[in-house]
Amino acid sequence: MNSALKTTLGTFGPLIALVVVFGLFALLPSMPSSFSDIYNLKTILTQTVIIGIGALGMTLVIISGGIDLSAGSQIALCSVVVARVMQSFQGDLDYLGFSSSILASLSGIGVCALVGLIMGFIITRFKIVPFIVTLGFMLVIRGGSKWLASNQMVVAPKNALLPLMDVQPEPTYLFFSLGVWILLALLLLLFIVLRYTIFGRITFAIGSNEATARLCGIAVEKYRVGIYALCGAFLGVSGVMQFANLGQGDPTAAIGMELDIIAAVVIGGGSLSGGEGSAFGTFVGALIMAVLRNGCNMLGVDNYVQEVIIGSIIVAAVALDRLKHQGT
Amino acid sequence: MPNETLLRLEGIHKNFGPVQALGGVDLEVRQGEVHALIGENGAGKSTLMKVLSGAHRAEQGKILFKDQPFTATDPASARSLGVGMIYQELNIAPHLSVEENITLGLDTSTFGFRNSKSQEVVECLKRLGHSDILPSTPAGQLSIGQQQIIEIARALFAKSRLIIMDEPTSSLSAEDSQALFKVIERLRDDGLSIIYISHFLEEVKAISDRYTVIRDGISVSTGIMSEASLDHIIEAMVGRSLEEMYPPKNHPVGGPVLKARELQGTELPQKADFELAKGEILGIAGLVGSGRSELIRCLYGLNHRVSGKVDVVGNPKSLTHRPQSSLKSGLNLLSENRKEEGLAVDLGLATNLTLSNLKPYRQGPFLNLKKERSSAQHWLKELRVKHHSPRQPASTLSGGNQQKVAIARLLHHDSRILLLDEPTRGIDVGSKAEIYRLIEELAGKGKSIVVVSSYLPELMGICDSLAVMHKGNLSPKKSITEWDENSVMRYATSGTLSS
């Protein structure tokens, strides 16, 4: 492969894959025509929100050379925390207004950021590989969520968060659901952070070569802790969306979702050895996953077939990435 | 039968992408001779060796071994054809026995069951004059020198006719080296041929029958060792007379800027005291493993400092043991491992260049990328780094140019005290001369520089003063004129100054 082609593949590869996947589905004779209508496109975007936002946070962690296997558990934790806080605000109200709803969301996001902070601290202080620490926390957080939820659904009062994931939002000029707009805003935010800030620069440096970062006097540990905390905050936002989607706190939500989230980052060009990844790529990666799931559902393909397809796509994406890195 | 050609290489070319590693190597090795392959780091010795072991394929040229075209495609097939390799790093499985190590990779089984070959192993060890090593001993219990014997025995066991040794003494003590030379003589008298790769000229001169010098991937000189003078060989290696290589020293040396007192690291260094003056170039010599790199890493804060004090003149407080505090006090370090530590090779040149000091480009949390890029361009131009864009990954540059980028980072940081660990390792001769000139220029601008190097002539060529490490202890610093090659080697090997 020549270098120009490689660069193009690196930048637009995920986007091309998205177009190809969507096109193939749309052209299938057995596919209902409603697959490519506006309403379904809006649905696919809305279905991208939870994984997409989490994947943006995970992009930071993966670029820094780490991984967070507790992502799914953190999303569930956040949804439970939001519901519990809302219950405590409830009193005699049957509807929670905007400010209490926001306050409840911020509590959930804050708890996840704190969890990220603690994991980051353990990873750096005791020099344990992130895989192990976050694997352990996947269970700890899941258990903690169930305990906080008394091992059942936490019913929350009606609140201002519920319309977040409506595919047809009010007012109608919004066109996409609010969740999609939040996803796009966070996408822009992460893009700017990675490209134009010192924090982003240092995240890449740590992931690309930690020894060089140390040599250059970068406080690697502090940044790592910050990166996990920030990823936690993104997962918290994801958890708020999860809560809005169900309308209640569910301690068993998002089981295994960390794998979808990591897959989105990797399909989008993130490298598990660190130093590579982009906000836009991750977004496209999440979209590819959502299109696959949505298309398979519309076709009535069984769940297990979906799993086989998505698993194969992940391996193919990484194989392509390796090819890109071979040679000079 | 001596004087019969065993191996003949003609016009070997090898490219890696656009980089030419070998551009025409001729080499003739006769039966029963020790043939020295001499060249500086980066001259192409290792590439040539990999071509011979079958790890790389030459694009042009021919290789005849025992008058047959040499067709090895990997080290195992090279070994079966009769070419054995002894690499610089020992390849010993420490938990396996001596016998298992020697027979490793060769099929010695009968119907899949292991078959004791201790008789033949004992025979091999005996031929090497080392009957004292027992086949059943775990290899990890042997000394480094003995482990090297195991490697050679492995080649003998495989019935090699030609043994290639790459810098075999680089990790050996003086006694082990002498023992190795005896083994080499025995092998030669047995009729085997040996290619001995090294840049320790004295050693090469003592044990080789003939030599070939390669420079920049081309064989430039070959002949009988006893008829060649050292100066002739050095000039062939370097490609120019020595005066051209090192710039004239004419920088003033001022008052002290840094004082290190009783530095001690976790293992190395044991004890090191020195002072550094403004505009001084201080060389640190010593054997591999004596703690030279550890000394400056400990000083800079990359290695843990157990005890000792580092004071920078003008700073009220001593340095803490973190790179951040060293950088603030004006110290900066060039790593000896360019690829593993010195540079983040997958990141762009500008990113690497500014990584230690992003302050000038800071606007709130944001980076002024335009300003960063123009400043990077300035430094890349200043150091004449061959590049096409400041955004290209550092991995796309040659070793010499990468090193210049790593040095550019120190200059961009505007540090006053530069700790350079093997600044010319693995780079071409032209870049070396440029780096020497740069070091002299920097000293002229009042920077204080510590140079750690395993190549004594370069320290002699550029330094004002020199100190020598011996087993973690640093000798007193003396003016370069008070040292000579003998006194440096004496301290490096014995830890004493007077004879």
Image (cartoon, coloured by chain):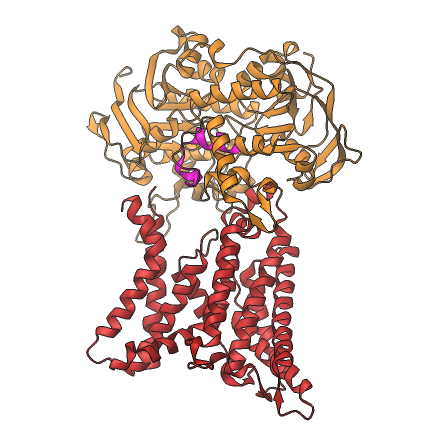
Chain colours: A red, B orange
Give residue B417's quadrant in the image: top right
Residue B104 location in percent, x, y?
39, 43
The region drawn magenta spans B389-406
Residue B305 location in percent, x, y?
71, 39
Give residue A305's quadrant in the image: bottom left
State the quadrant of the C terminus of chain A. Answer: top left
- Left-right relation of A320 to B333: left
The front one of A138 and B499 is A138
- Left-right relation of A18 to A147: left
Number of callouts? 0
Looking at the image, which residue is at 50% across and 38% down?
Answer: B134
The answer to whether residue B54 shows anywhere in this view is yes
The answer to whether residue A256 shows anywhere in this view is no
Residue A244 position (above or below residue B156): below
Main secondary structure along the magenta-highlighted residues: helix
The front one of B166 and B26 is B26
Residue A247 location in percent, x, y?
53, 85
Residue B300 position (above or below residue B485): below
Give residue B222's quadrant in the image: top left
Looking at the image, which residue is at 55% across and 14% down?
Answer: B461
The front one of B84 and A147 is A147
Was residue B390 drawn as part of the magenta stretch in this picture?
Answer: yes
The front one of B109 and B277 is B277
Residue B64 location in percent, x, y?
23, 26
Looking at the image, which residue is at 61% across and 42% down?
Answer: B359
